[in-house]
Image: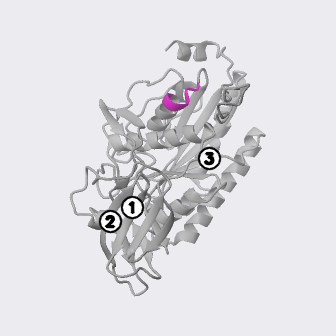
Amino acid sequence: MKKILALFASFAIMAFYSCGGDDNDNNEVPEEPAKFELADINHIITYGQSLGEGSHSSPVLTTSPFADNALMFNHGIKTHYGLNPMYRFFVPHIEQLNEENGETPAAGTAQKFIIDYKPGEAYILSSCCAKGSTTIAQLSKGSEWYNNMLADVTNAKRLADEQGKSYKLLAVTWSQGEYDYGNGIEYYKTKLKQLRADLIADVEVITGEDYSKLPFITYQVSSSYSAGKSYPDIGLALYELGIEAGNGFYMATPIYHMQYFDKWHLVNVSSKLLGAYYGHVLSEILSGNEWEPLRPVSHTVSGDNILLVFNKGGLAFSKPDYLTENIPNHGFSVKNSEGKELIKFVIIVSDNTIKIECVDTPRDVTVTYGFSNTNNRNAGELHDSSSVKMKIGGTTFSMYNWCSIFEYKL
């Protein structure tokens, strides 16, 4: 706690944390990617609807500070529950229960980012502006919730300036989509791109700095059947945004493998774990590493077989712990233009390749994953063998990259 006390007393520590790759005169070792240069105060905003504000994720887990350099505003982590006087100073990051809203993903994000990125003396400031039961339109520019983000940035910048500290909005994490099923892929992509563009423009006015590369880190909503929809259009929209190069969107993970409180919401441990995925991906991005979710990248057809190659290795099948219903064909489906299912079986044949044997030669077919209804989720059983882990509530979780819900046309 010495760093926090120093922050309140004089805020005397000046630190821009940056680290390039090791030089090698003989060029025997490739230079590592340069890490992003942090400011003194680095702000991560949690945004979206109910999963963003930790609806039903109680009891709260993060009731004491998890790092000396993890901060929030004095009025609490959730901006729209803040009581006056607001924006007075920074305090250690803890989570609180507000009505039914408990552990947000924010603590998991900050904690995992600090673990992975090792930001030295730089501070990580978190705030949550999410609001449950809202559409993307209701969260867009001009809304109360959007304006809360601008207030958070404005006041974080002011507090930093008052202490002679530098400030950056580091990233926005996005947990929303349940209220937009049925609106279509292009509608949702257009709205989310516009929201990010509007926020960048407004933050640039507040800070006077370039935010054109501001990362928006998303989950993949995985509950279309809870909305009565068999086609997971919003999950696919988030997937497409996450694999389009250079647009500022990074899809961290689907959530079908996590423990739900009900057909929509996550329990407290899973809410923090979702945040940990966000924090890990942010660390990867700022470390100069490329990031994509687990997905197919190429295929070949041989007779009645489809060989589907993925972008990550160590592929494995295992049923998510909290699902009780059967997942046909590990979550895969192959249908022809007439809608006939062609799969006989699916197996893993190499480190990054699966084989789908069909009842007939697959021509003009669409391969999908995660379209089946399993406990009201779009679920599957494919993941990689990532060694990334996170300890939450005394339990260490393997943070496998679970396969994205996808639609792949041959």
Q: Which residue is mark 2?
A: 346
285 or 232, nearer to the observer: 285
* Mark 1 vs 2: CB contact within 8 A: yes
Q: Earlier in the sequence, mark 3 or mark 1?
A: 3
- Kindly state the secondary structure of the residue where label 2 is placed: strand
The residue that appears at 42% across and 72% down in the rendered structure is: 367
The three-letter code of the residue at mark 1 reads Ile
The three-letter code of the residue at mark 2 reads Val
Is residue 117 within the magenta segment? yes
* Mark 3 vs 2: CB contact within 8 A: no
Q: What's drawn in magenta, residue-wise?
A: 115-119
The residue that appears at 35% across and 58% down in the rendered structure is: 348
* Mark 3 vs 1: CB contact within 8 A: no
Q: Earlier in the sequence, mark 1 or mark 2?
A: 2
Does the image show residue 354? yes
Q: Which residue is mark 1?
A: 354
**How far apart are labels 3 and 1 at the CA level?**
32 Å
Main SS of the magenta part reads helix
Q: Which residue is mark 3?
A: 215
**Which mark is in front, 3 or 2?**
2
62 or 316, nearer to the observer: 316
